[in-house]
Image (cartoon, helix red, strand yellow):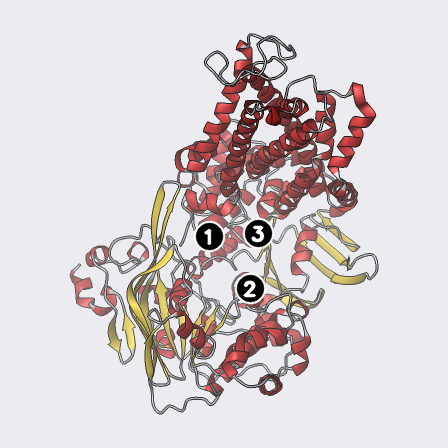
Amino acid sequence: MLAILRDLMRYRPQFRLGVILTGVIVAFAALTLASPHPQQDQFVVPPDVPPSWAHWFGTTSRGQDVFWQLTFAIRNTMLFGFTVAILSRLISVAIGMWSGYKGGFVDRVLMSINDTFIVIPLFPLLVLFYFVMRDKMSWPLLALAMAALGWAYDARLIRSLALSLKTREFTQQCEFSGMRTSEIVLQEHLPYVLPIMFYTTMNNMNWSIGLEVTLSVLGFTNIDTPTVGVMIYWANQHTALVAGIWWWIFFPVLFVMILFIGLFLLAISMNEYIDPRSRLARMGGASG
Amino acid sequence: MNTVPAQVKGPERVLSVTNLRAYYQTQYFGISREVRAVDGVSLHIDRNEIYGLAGESSCGKTTLIKTIVRAIRPPLSIVEGSVMFNFAGRECDIYRLNRHELDSMRWRRLACILQGSMNVLNPVRRVRQSFIDFAFRHIGQPMPQFLALIEGHLARLRLEPAILDNYPHELSGGMRQRVTIALASVCRPDFIVADEPTTALDVVVQKDVLGLMREVQREIRSSMILVTHDIGVHANVTDRMGIMYAGRLVEEGRTVDVIRNPRHPYAVHLVASLPRIGDTTQKQGLEGAPPNLAAPPPGCRFHPRCPLVMDVCRKEHPPLVDVAAGHRVACWAATQPDARRAA
Amino acid sequence: MRALLDVDHVGMTYFVGGLLSRRAVRAVDDVSLRLETDKPEILAIIGESGSGKTTLARMILNLAKPTDGAIRFLDTDVTTIGRNRARMRFMRQVQPIFQNPFAAFNPLKRLDRYLFMSARRLADARGADIEAAADKALHQVGLSLAEVRGRFPHELSGGQLQRIAIARALISSPKLIVADEPVSMVDASLRMSIVNLFKSLRDELKVSIIYITHDLATAYYISDRVLIMQGGRAVESGDARDVLVNPQHAYSRLLKESVLSPQDAGKPFVPVGGISA
C-alpha cells in the first residue's frame, strides 16, 4: 500500500494536487489549537468587520472572528466526515466480505437488507431523526445515524470483490497450502481490497460532509457547535448576503470546496491503481 | 454493390505484407517499455488459399493479425512496413484508406472470424439483427430480398434458418461459431481472417467447424489466414503455413513441406514433440522459455534455446531465405551448414 | 488391501433456475473408479466440456459434495472431512494442480511464499528445514530455490509456473495428485517437459495421478488407464493403450476420429458427418 502511495505521489499530478489541497485543509484545522477564543463564544470581537489585517477573514454578525470560527468549523466537519466514513467502512466491509465468502442463504439475507438500505430515502429519514431527537441531537448521534445509513452501496462493491476472489484459483491453491481462511482473507485478498477501501473512504467522506452541510444549513443539527454548515446557517439567519457581510459565507464555502476537491482528487487517482491489470502492467508483465 | 463473386484466373496476390514492424510503446508511472510484437515480417497470400500462422503465446501472431486488418490502437502502432491488399484487381494500402473507404471495404472485402464468438455477436440482440447490422448495407438489396439471401446462405451451410430468431446465449459454442462463419462469409469477401476460431471448442465440434470453414472458403474462393497454435489444425486445414517465433517468421512454406520436412530447429522440435496415439517413443520438451519481447536476445531470437546454436546466431539475425521451392527458413544452421562445421 | 481412492457410484445433481422454474442438471451420473495403494498409476479422465470431469475432480478434492454415492480415500469418506485437522491430514495426501498456471498464484505475492507455507503447514517443517523442503521439491521438478526465490509470477513462463505449482504440491509427499488440464494452457514447446515430469512422479516418487484432459494424444502417452466421460457418465474405461487404439464405444470412436493429427498433412480432410453441437 505504501508503495502505491509513493508511486502515485511521484507520477500522478492529480494525486499530488489532492494531497496538497487536503493537506492545507488539515493544517488549517490544526490551527484550532492556537485559537484565542473557544468555539462557542459569541460577541468576543466587534461584529461585521470586513476582512482586514486584524481579522483576516472578517467577523460575523455574532461577534466571532471568521478565521478562528472556520478553523473549528473545518475541524468539526472533517472529524464528522471521517468518523462517518470509518464507521460505515467497518459495516460495509464486514457485511460485504461475510456475504461474499459465505454465499448461499447468508448472502441472500444480507443483500436483501442491503438493498433495502439503498432504496431508503436518506434525507427525509435524517430530518425525521432530528425532529424525533430534537434537543438530544448531538454530533456523535448524527454520525452514528449516518454511518448506519451509508454503508449499503459499498457493501455490494466489496461483496462482488469477495465473490470474485473466492473463486479464483490461487485462493484454492492457498487452501491446499494449509492456509486458514482468515489468513487467506487478510494476507492474500487484502491487497486487492485496500485500494478500493481507500477510494470508498474518500467518497464516503465527501458524501457525509455534503449531507452534513445540507442538514446544518437547514438547521436540522446541533447549531451550537460550529461546522461549515452551521456557519452558513447562522449567516442565513442574520441575512448576511443582504446585509453585505459576504465574507461570512464566502470563506466557509471556499474552504469546504477545497476540501471536497482535494478528497475527490485523492479518490479518483487511486482509481487507476485499483485495476489489477494496470498494476501488473507496471510491474512489467510477461508479454506484449 | 452486388454479390457476384469476382472471377479470377490463376494465382494472384491478395495480401502482401512487407517488412512490417508493430510495437507496443507504453509510458506508465515512469516505466517506459517498447514491446516488439511484430519485428520485420514479410509474407504474401494468394487468392483461394488458406494460409496458416502458427506459434506459441507471445510470438506476435495476434498482433500481426490486428495490424493486417488495421484494428490497432495506441499503444500499438506501426513503426515500419506496409500492408497491401489486392481486391478485384485494385491495389490498396490499408493504412492509406480514409474512414469511408475503410468502412465500405470491411466485411464486403475483408471479414473476420474471431475466437470467442460472443465477441462478434451482440448478446442482447437476435442473430438476425447481427446479420442486418453487418451485411445489410453491403448487400444493398431491400430487406425482404436480403433476408431471403441470408436464409439461403445458411441453408447452404447446413444451418437451420430458425436460428436467426435465437439470441446468442441460446446457442451452443459450436453453433455460435458456425453462425460467425456464416456471418463472415455472407458478403463473399475476398479475404477472411480467422484468429483461433476453434480453440475454445471441443474436439468433436472443432473438426466439424473447421470442415465448414474450408467448405465456405472453397465455395467463395476467398483467401484465408488462419491463426492457431495447434499444429494438427494446420496439418489438416491449411495450404501454406508460417511459423512465428518472438515476433519474426522463422519458417514458411507449403504445409505438407513444413510438417514433413521442417528445417528450423524450433519447427523441428514443434513437430517432433507432439505425442500421437499409437506412438510410445519418448518426447522431449524444449529448455528455456519464449523471450520477453521488451528485451529480446540479440541476433537470432531462438539462439538461447537452440541445440544448433553457432557464434553467428548470437550476433546477427538470419534472413528468411529459400531452401526449396516456396519453402523459406530463417536460420543460419539450416542455410549455412558449412558455417556450423567450422564453428 | 484398502484402496487409495474408491469412487463408488458417485453422482452430482445441481439445480438451475430461480424460484419459479427449477431444473435438475445431472453433472455426474453413477461414476466409479478405483486406485490401489500398492500400484502408483496415472489415470486419465478424458471428456469434453460438460462431461463432468472437472466436477468429479472437485468432488475428489473435497471442494464439492456428491449428491449420490461415496468417495473414500484410504477408507475415509471424503465428505466427512471437515475444516480442521482431518482436512489438514487429507490435504497432505491429496493435492491439486490447476489448469491455468498464471491464475494459480496471487500475482501480487512472491512465489516462494506458497512453497514455504506448504512446508510449514503440511510438512511440519521448522526453521532451516523449511527452505530445505522447498529446495528439494523444486529439484524434483527440475528447478531450484535459487532460481525461484523472490520472484513474482509474471516474471516466469507458464511452463515454469506450472512446475512450481507441481513442486508445491509435492512438498507434503502426497499419495495422490489430481491434475485438471495441467498442460492445456502451457506453450507447446514446454508442454512435453511437464508431461514427462508426471511420468517421473509416478515412476520415481510413486505418486498416483488423476490426469484430466481433453487431449487424447498426451493421455495415450503417459496414462496407464483411461476413463472416458460424456454428459456426466462414464462411457468407456480400461487400459490406456487398449481403449485409445481400439475404442469400443461409439463416443470414444467419435473422439478418436475427431483428433487432428499432424500425420495427416497432405491427406484430404474428411469432416465427421452429421454432428450438431
Question: Could you say whether the residue bearing mark 1 is in a helix, strand or loop?
Answer: helix
The mark that comes first in sequence, 3 or 2, is 3
Mark 3: give few (<14), some (14-19) or many (20+) Cα within 10 Å. Answer: many
Name the amino acid, label 1.
Gly
Percent coordinates x, y for residue C142 in the rendering: 43, 47
Quarter of the image with the C terminus of chain B in it = bottom left
Question: Could you say whether the residue bearing mark 3 is in a helix, strand or loop?
Answer: loop
Relative side of C65 to B289, left or right: right
Question: Could you say whether the residue bearing mark 2 is in a helix, strand or loop?
Answer: helix
Mark carried by residue C98 = 3
Task: Say which of A21 and B44 sits in front.
Answer: A21
The residue labelled by disc 2 is C219
Relative side of A20 to B249, left or right: right
Residue at mark 2 to residue at mark 1: CA–CA distance: 20 Å
Relative side of A128 to C56, left or right: right
Name the amino acid, label 3.
Phe
* Residue appearing at x 65%, y 72% in the figure: B126
* Residue appearing at x 76%, y 31% in the figure: A126
Percent coordinates x, y for residue B6 in the rendering: 41, 89
Determine the residue located farthest toward the left in the rendered image.
B342
The residue labelled by disc 1 is C158
Residue C240 in which image quadrant: bottom right
Residue at mark 3 to residue at mark 2: CA–CA distance: 17 Å
When the figure is inspected, residue B69 is found, relative to residue C144, above or below; the finding is below
The mark that comes first in sequence, 3 or 1, is 3
**Viewer-nearest of discs 2 and 1:** 1
When the figure is inspected, residue B137 is found, relative to residue A67, above or below; the finding is below
Circles 3 and 1 on the same chain:
yes
* Residue B204 showing in the rendered view: no
Name the amino acid, label 2.
Ala
**Chain assignment, label 3:** C
